[in-house]
């Protein structure tokens, strides 16, 4: 079964573990989940209100 999951965030979430920063992926694109690998940078020019699908490094706008 496949699932479509919508992620609205474009930045990681910082958490402190024993005083050390860890960055948690919030965009859903990281290949190193739950940690951020910088993939959120692909989302910087997304337009608000639009839905996108990512296949590797390719972004596709989803339309009705």
Image (cartoon, rainbow, N blue to C red):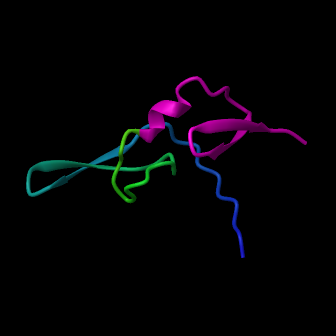
**25 on left or right of 56:** left
Direction from residue 49 to residue 24 in the image, left or right: left
Residue 27 rendering spot, x and y as whole percentages: 50, 46
Residue in view at x 52 percent, y 32 percent: 42
Q: Is residue 11 above or below residue 17?
A: above
Confirm whether the magenta stretch covers residue 60: yes
Quarter occupied by the N terminus: bottom right
Q: Nearer the viewer, residue 31 or 25?
A: 31
From the top left corner, tell me how far across and down residue 11 is, in percent. 43, 37
Q: Quadrant of residue 49?
A: top right
- Please tell me whether residue 60 is drawn above or below residue 16 in the rendered image: above
As drawn, which residue projects farthest toward the bottom? Answer: 1
Residue at 67% across, 29% down: 48
Residue nearest the viewer, comparing 60 with 8: 60
Split into 4 quadrants, where in the image is the C terminus? top right
Give the quadrant of residue 51: top right
Q: How many marks?
A: 0
Name the residue furthest left: 18
**Outermost residue toward the top in this view:** 45
Whole-percent x and y of residue 53?
69, 44
Residue 45 covered by magenta stretch: yes
Query: In the picture provided, is 64 more to the left or to the right than 25?
Result: right
Residue at (70% x, 60% y) in the render: 4
Q: Which contiguous range is marked in magenta?
A: 39-64
56 with respect to 12 (left or right): right
Can you give x and y, in whole percent of width and height, for residue 12 in the image? 38, 43
């Amino acid at each position: 079964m496949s699932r479509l999951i919508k992620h609205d965030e474009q930045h990681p979430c910082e958490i402190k573990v024993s005083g050390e920063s860890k960055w948690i992926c919030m965009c859903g694109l990281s290949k190193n989940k739950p940690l951020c690998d910088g993939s959120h940078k692909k989302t910087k020019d997304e337009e608000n209100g639009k839905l996108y699908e990512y296949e590797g490094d390719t972004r596709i706008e989803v339309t009705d």
